[in-house]
Amino acid sequence: MSERISREELVRIYNIEITFFDELVDYGLLNIQIEDNIHYLMYDDLPDLEKFANWYYDLEVNLPGLEVIHNMLKKLDALNRRNRELMNKLSAIRDQYEDI
């Protein structure tokens, strides 16, 4: 099983409001596991929580804004991956024609 941390520990460590954490979950920005009525976040998802907390508390971006930014960054990442794939294919095709 992957490592995880409880919501209560996160609230204490990151000095965030429990309602902020719960709203991130409600917006679908964080995925949690619930066991014995304890909410857990996987360690792999900590960078997202840190990013959201920075945007929310430091930059004062509201929750709908967090959702928009997060979705746009995911789409941008997917487009960048696709662009790399296409550039690699183009390079392979170019190499084939140079051999002719």
Image: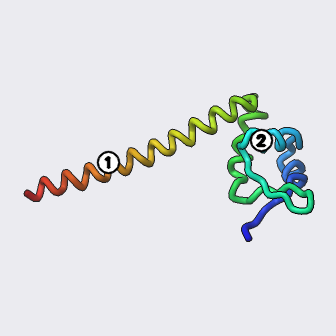
Give the CA distance from mark 1 to mark 2.
36 Å
At horizontal 76% and vertical 34% (from top left) the residue drawn is 56
Q: Residues within 10 Å of mark 2 (few under 14, many from 20)?
A: many
At horizontal 86% and vertical 57% (from top left) the residue drawn is 6
Q: Secondary structure at mark 1?
A: helix
Question: Is 40 above or below relative to 20?
Answer: below
Q: Where is residue 100 drawn, in percent x and y?
A: 7, 57
Which residue carries the number 1 mark? 87
* Mark identifier at residue 2: none
Task: Give the residue type at disc 2.
Answer: Leu
Quadrant of the frame with the N terminus: bottom right
Is 78 displayed left or right of 99 in the figure?
right
At horizontal 68% and vertical 35% (from top left) the residue drawn is 67
Q: Residues within 10 Å of mark 1 (few under 14, many from 20)?
A: few
At horizontal 69% and vertical 47% (from top left) the residue drawn is 48
Is 90 displayed left or right of 17 in the figure?
left
Is 26 displayed left or right of 99 in the figure?
right
* Mark identifier at residue 24: 2
Question: Is 5 above or below relative to 22?
Answer: below
Q: Where is residue 45 drawn, in percent x and y?
A: 70, 54
Question: Is 49 above or below relative to 56?
Answer: below
Q: Residue furthest bottom?
A: 1
